[in-house]
Amino acid sequence: MAVKKTPKNEASKNNSPRYPLTELKTHAEELFEVRAEVLAGAMYGADAELFTVTEVKERIQQFMKAKVV
């Protein structure tokens, strides 16, 4: 039987606990070193209801690097 290999990043994302956005906003400063407002902006328009800490960190980094027009 063949086993499908997945990159380590994908495997770790699948095994990481997922949290509701409201709980992540409550602990935004401790987890991400940003205010809850920044987290809200980074997650604006997100379709899912549960997120891993890694997913949110990546979205915050993208949000902070975005150019303002």
Image: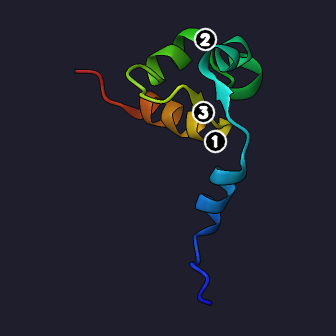
Question: Residue 35 occupies which quadrant of the picture?
Answer: top right
Q: CA distance from mark 2 to mark 1?
A: 16 Å
Q: Earlier in the sequence, mark 2 or mark 1?
A: 2
Other residues around mark 2 within 10 Å, as few (<14) / some (14–19) / many (≥20): some
Image point (60%, 11%), residue name: 36
Image point (53%, 40%), residue name: 58
Which residue has dot 1 on it? 54
Q: Amino acid at mark 2?
A: Ala
Q: Is residue 26 above or below residue 17?
A: above
Which residue has dot 3 on it? 51
Q: CA distance from mark 1 to mark 3?
A: 8 Å
Quarter of the rendering occupied by the N terminus? bottom right
Question: Residue 49 occupies which quadrant of the picture?
Answer: top right
Q: Earlier in the sequence, mark 3 or mark 2?
A: 2
Other residues around mark 1 within 10 Å, as few (<14) / some (14–19) / many (≥20): some
Q: Amino acid at mark 1?
A: Thr
Q: Position of residue 53 (x, y in %)?
A: 67, 36
> Is residue 40 shown left or right of residue 69?
right
CB atoms of marks 3 and 2 within 8 Å: no
Which residue has dot 2 on it? 36
The type of colouring in the image is: rainbow
Q: Is residue 4 above or below residue 56?
A: below
